[in-house]
């Protein structure tokens, strides 16, 4: 395991779930963190916990990744040493709705495409040139098993995650010949606020997604992200599929009655 002590790690979508778990495990490993999301109150609370528990340096950043000019302004304005980002974890993302494609809510589609695809691109475009100049960096994209295979009602979400995976592959090609690494992580079912967001706050419906099975925890995924980030410089973990034991594919899960 290579040390990431004092490295600067930017985590998007750090206010909840997988992003929050990444924040904690990277802080424990000695990294300094830029925590980005829209809910600043959550980020500030997390920053306090992390600072108290791990004595890590934390920079909470209120950011909507869909807002291109906000993304550009925020990253251009980062003071040193925060602007020298070593590891970018592109995690911010969401699903909205589970409707048949021909009946879907177009606003839901816009939100998923704007966040999961365009938001990830805006952040990547802002951060990677600095990595190339400094000849150091690692981009870790959180895609999904849903990008490997569509499921009913998930067409648009699955398409955004397939796009993330393809962007990871393309970025890896474009960075060939530089020391910058790219990792694509495809988690299966992880119990977070993800399904509550998908069902527009319907907590009861969200619970049914994980009923009768043992889903992954955000910490399970964060451990894999940390593993990717702590390989020696000549090793690039390009693709990881991490599933609950009760899940085989995007559509096949085993549930206890
Ligand atoms: P959560 O809903 O718990 O977390 C999502 C995070 O994304 C929140 O911190 C949210 O913060 C942030 N976010 C959403 N929209 C924006 C935006 N416009 N700008 C900035 N931040 C934003 O879900 P998860 O932790 O599960 O999801 C994290 C990632 O993992 C997503 O990309 C998701 O698609 C992916 N994933 C999830 C799986 C699961 O089963 N849970 C499985 C596979 C992949 P805020 O609202 O404060 O902005
Ligand atoms: C999230 C996993 O199966 O709920 O990407 O779409 S799933």
Image (tube, rainbow, N blue to C red):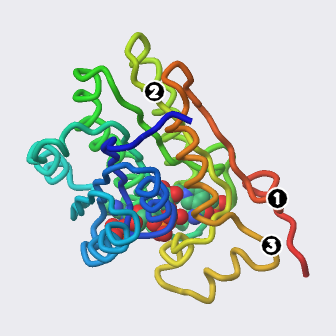
Residue at x 64%, y 39% (from the top left corner): 240
Label 1: which secondary element: loop
Label 2: which secondary element: strand
Residue 137 position (above or below residue 23): above
Quadrant of the image for the C terminus? bottom right
Quarter occupied by residue 51: bottom left
Which one is earlier in the sequence, the residue at label 3 or at label 1? 3
Ligand number 1: quarter of image? bottom left
C-alpha span from label 2 to label 3: 34 Å
Quadrant of the image for the N terminus? top right
Q: Are marks 3 and 1 in contact (CB under 8 Å)?
A: no
Label 3: which secondary element: loop
Residue at x 51%, y 61% (from the top left corner): 18
Residue at x 64%, y 58% (from the top left corner): 220
Residue 16 spot, x, y in % from top left: 44, 70
Q: Which residue has dot 1 on it?
A: 245
Which one is earlier in the sequence, the residue at label 2 or at label 3? 2
Residue at x 31%, y 59% (from the top left corner): 35
Residue 131 position (above or below residue 54): above
Query: Counting other residues with Cα less than 10 Å from the Cα at mark 2, is it few (<14), some (14-19), or many (20 or more)?
Result: many
Q: Are marks 2 and 1 in contact (CB under 8 Å)?
A: no
Q: Nearer the viewer, residue 101 or 178?
A: 178
Q: Which residue has dot 3 on it?
A: 213
Which one is earlier in the sequence, the residue at label 2 or at label 1? 2
Q: Which residue has dot 2 on it?
A: 181
Residue 126 spot, x, y in % from top left: 22, 38
Residue 198 spot, x, y in % from top left: 52, 72
Is label 1 within 8 A of ligand 1 (CB to nearest ligand atom)? no
């Amino acid at each position: 395991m290579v040390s990431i002590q004092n490295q600067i790690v930017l985590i998007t979508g750090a206010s909840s779930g997988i992003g929050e778990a990444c924040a904690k495990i990277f802080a424990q490993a000695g990294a300094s963190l830029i925590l980005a999301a829209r809910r600043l109150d959550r980020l500030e609370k997390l920053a306090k916990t992390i600072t108290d528990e791990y004595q890590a340096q934390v920079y909470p950043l209120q950011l909507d990744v869909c807002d291109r000019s906000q993304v550009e302004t925020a990253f251009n304005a980062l003071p040193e040493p925060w602007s020298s980002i070593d590891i970018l974890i592109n995690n911010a993302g969401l699903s909205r709705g589970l409707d048949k494609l021909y009946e879907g809510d177009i606003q839901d589609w816009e939100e998923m495409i704007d966040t999961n695809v365009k938001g990830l691109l805006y952040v990547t475009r802002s951060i990677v040139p600095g990595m190339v100049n400094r000849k150091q960096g690692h981009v870790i994209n959180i895609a999904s098993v849903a990008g490997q295979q569509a499921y009913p009602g998930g067409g648009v979400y699955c398409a955004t995650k397939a796009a993330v995976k393809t962007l990871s592959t393309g970025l890896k090609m474009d960075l060939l010949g530089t020391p910058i690494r790219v990792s694509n992580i495809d988690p299966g079912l992880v119990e977070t606020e993800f399904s509550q967001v998908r069902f527009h706050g319907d907590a009861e419906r969200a619970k049914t997604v994980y009923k009768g099975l043992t889903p992954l925890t955000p910490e399970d995924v964060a451990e894999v992200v940390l593993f990717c980030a702590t390989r020696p410089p000549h090793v690039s973990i390009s693709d990881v599929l991490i599933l609950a034991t009760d899940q085989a594919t995007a559509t096949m899960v085993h549930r206890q009655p």
